Amino acid sequence: MTKKHDKTFVNLVSVVIGGLIGLAVCIFALAKYVGARAESLSETDAQYRALVQERLTPVGRVAVAGKDNSTLAIPAAGPKVVAAPVAMLAVMSGEQTYQMTCSTCHATGVGGAPKFGNAKDWSRRLAEGLPMLKEHALHGLTDEGGVMPAKGGRPDLPDESVANAVEYMVKAAK
């Protein structure tokens, strides 16, 4: 029985060693191929040297205090262009503002937002009064009931559009 195990072991070792020798031959052939291609690029070739220099050029440079850093100066790029200020959106109706911004949360109740048209969801907030609801919509609110970002996360909305949207949602909840 030990002869059979010995023969199996010897066969297995022979296969592994044969595989390693085959792998070594493949690696040797690959190295010869790569080496032959590398020899075709001469270190004296100007194009090759330029490519190597480009790859070796540092990505950034560091200014050192007390040293001459004039070579690090950023070249002037011509006349400076100043962007015009972004125009605010025109005042929209409550329904338009709701559709454009508020529905993102109030249609499904995301973040504890009272759902549009659901009187039960709005009852606690309606008890605070319309002026307080407008204040929360304009400046934001975080409490145990949920989160309301200022202007629904749209700082470009005119205050009047936000107030119109609050009135629109309150009417739908009554």
Image: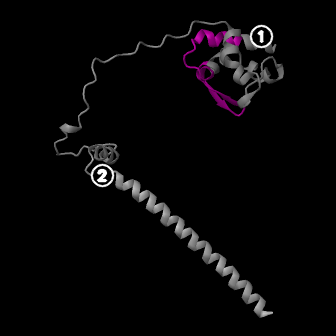
Residue 108, quarter of the rendered image = top right
Residue 1, quarter of the rendered image = bottom right
Is 165 a magenta residue?
yes
Nearest the eye: 126 or 12: 12
In the image, what residue type sits under mark 1? Answer: Lys
**Distance in Å between CA atoms under marks 1 and 2:** 81 Å
The label shown at residue 112 is none
The label shown at residue 42 is 2
Q: Position of residue 153 (x, y in %)?
A: 60, 23
Q: Which residue is mark 1?
A: 171
Residue drawn at 71 percent across, 16 percent down: 129
Residue drawn at 45 percent across, 62 percent down: 31
User: Secondary structure beneath disc 2?
Assistant: loop
Relative height, residue 172 to residue 2 (above, below): above
Relative height, residue 2 to residue 49 (above, below): below
Magenta range = 138-167
Residue 87 is left or right of residue 95, and the answer is: left
Relative height, residue 45 to residue 143 (above, below): below
User: Secondary structure beneath disc 1?
Assistant: helix
Quarter of the image for the C terminus: give it. top right
Residue 130 visible, this orientation: no
Residue drawn at 70 percent across, 82 percent down: 11
